[in-house]
Amino acid sequence: MSTMWTTRLRKATVEKFEPQDVLPDEQPSYVASFIYVFGVLTLAALFIIIGSGLWLTTKGAIWWHSSSVGHFVNSVHLWSVELFFVFMVVHLWGKFWMAAWRGKRLMTWVTGAIAFLASVATGFTGYLIQWDFDSQWIATQAKDGLNSVGIGSFFNTLNTGQAILLHVSLLPLVVGLIVIWHVILVRKNGVVPPLDANEIAGGTQ
Amino acid sequence: MVLEAISLSGPAKFFNWGFISISIPNLIMIGLIVVLFVLALVIPFPTHDSSEHTPSSERK
């Protein structure tokens, strides 16, 4: 085994992927179902969220509350989040009922679950930094909730500075990296076949 | 009634059933997701003629 870390890293990463697996132009026939499109719909919504979020970040709260373009971008950000969660929940249910962790896909399932939880945290901090009465109400209610489980001192929802930094830096980074890892695993291991396809093939996944 | 339930100009109405208390907007979203899930399972996926495209694995 090579002692060079560049060689080891290359063998552990890029050499494990065939170009046709990374950017395929064919899929198994069972993928021709609408239940298989919700993963990529979630991804598309995430791109819109990140794009509109970057725009909001450069302009600030006065802009998104007072200008018509700001209202529009703020609404695009909110509704892309709503669609992101709708698509993600349908994707989650679909994968749960086809036991998508089969065939050495456990880490694909686990990274998806972590991405879901990190997205909930990111969405929550987003509601905290709307800069309106709604965010104040949510912050005070959540403060009671987090205090009751003993973590109110670590995550203080009344601290707007902490909430906005979590929302625009740390949590998007976590969601982004986990989603990239998730997609790489899907490409590496392939799309999970439905349960009856497995039975027809006569094997076990 | 329906228009009143989805009005965005005031506090949300709540659905209460025993210990369950959920806002109508949240209930609508959950119902929408369930409907979308069922539709995704039952609506046939449009397919195209596979002879129009030769996958890279079959090309010489």
Image (cartoon, coloured by chain):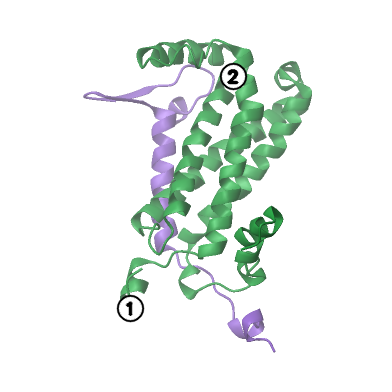
Q: As drawn, which residue projects farthest toward the bottom? A: B60
- Tell me which chain the residue with mark 2 is part of: A
Tell me the CA gap for discs 2 and 1. Answer: 51 Å
- A64 or A202, which lies in front? A202
Q: Quadrant of residue A205?
A: bottom left
Relative to A109, is A164 on the left or the right?
right
Label drawn at residue A163: 2
The chain coloured green is A
What residue is at 57 percent from the left and 11 percent from the top? A159
- Tell me which chain the residue with mark 1 is part of: A
A166 over A40 or under it: above or below: above
Q: Can residue B55 be seen? A: no
The chain coloured purple is B
A88 over A22 or under it: above or below: above
Q: Residues within 10 Å of mark 1 (few under 14, many from 20)?
A: few
- B33 or A149, which lies in front? A149
Q: Which residue is tagged 1?
A: A200
> What type is the residue that disc 1 sits on?
Ile
Closer to the chain start, of discs 2 and 1, is 2
Relative to A70, is A141 on the left or the right?
left
Could you tell me residue A101's position as x and y percent? Answer: 39, 57
